[in-house]
Image: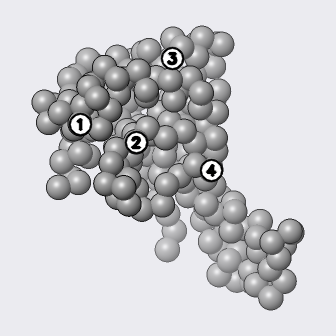
Amino acid sequence: MKLEAKNFNYNTKIISEPAFDNHITLYNGYINKLNEIDDVLKQNPEEAKANATYSHFRGLKVAETFALCGVILHELYFENIGNTQTQPSQETINTLAKYFGDFTKWHKDFTACANSARGWVCLIYDQRTESFRNIVLDAHNEGNIPHSYPVLALDMYEHAYFMDYGTDKAGYIATFMEYINWDVVNRRLQNLK
């Protein structure tokens, strides 16, 4: 089964339309590469030569997780970036306060994570510990918590902000925090019930 790209229209104040279009190009590239990897794995993955140090099979499997996580994280990001200032629901505020002390502490922690991230920062629900966490991913497939549910995703790769903000990483993060689409985040939290 071929993975199809979702349609995302430009509708955000966080990044410019040219930056958004570049993001969509990258997103489509991850989809195309994942489909290509899937085709190769179906044909002749050279499983018998699999090796942890180096093998074609290992390369395909590592690239598979990088591409698939790239698709999923970008979809989450495109859905939760907004163009108006919305508010978290009281239930969302209460949930974040329960796990972070209060909403302001969650905000500070998420911002600190974003400042330290090379790839992504996500608010997740960790089903193992039954708690919410802000996590840092240095790459699409490095730092993900198995069996977790993503609630909010922020792309911190330099391509995400450099076109619009240059080296002003903090400005990008502040604008993201101001224009989170809380309706999407609120709905994701509701889906946990």
**Residue 8, image x, y percentages:** 40, 40
Q: Is residue 107 visible?
A: yes
Q: Quadrant of residue 22?
A: top right
**Residue 16, image x, y percentages:** 49, 19
Characterize the local packing of mark 4: few (<14), some (14-19) or many (20 or more) Cα atoms within 10 angstroms.
some
Question: Which of the pair 109/141 is nearer the observer?
Answer: 109
- For marks 4 and 2, the one nearer the N-term is 2
The residue mark sitting in front, 3 or 2, is 2
To which residue does mark 3 refer? 172
To which residue does mark 4 refer? 142
- For marks 3 and 4, the one nearer the N-term is 4
Mark 4 → mark 2, Cα distance in angstroms: 16 Å
Which residue is depicted at the point 80% across and 72% down?
Answer: 52
Mark 3 and mark 1 in contact (Cβ < 8 Å)?
no
Residue 189 appears left or right of 118:
left
The residue mark sitting in front, 4 or 2, is 2
Question: Which of the pair 176/142 is nearer the observer?
Answer: 142
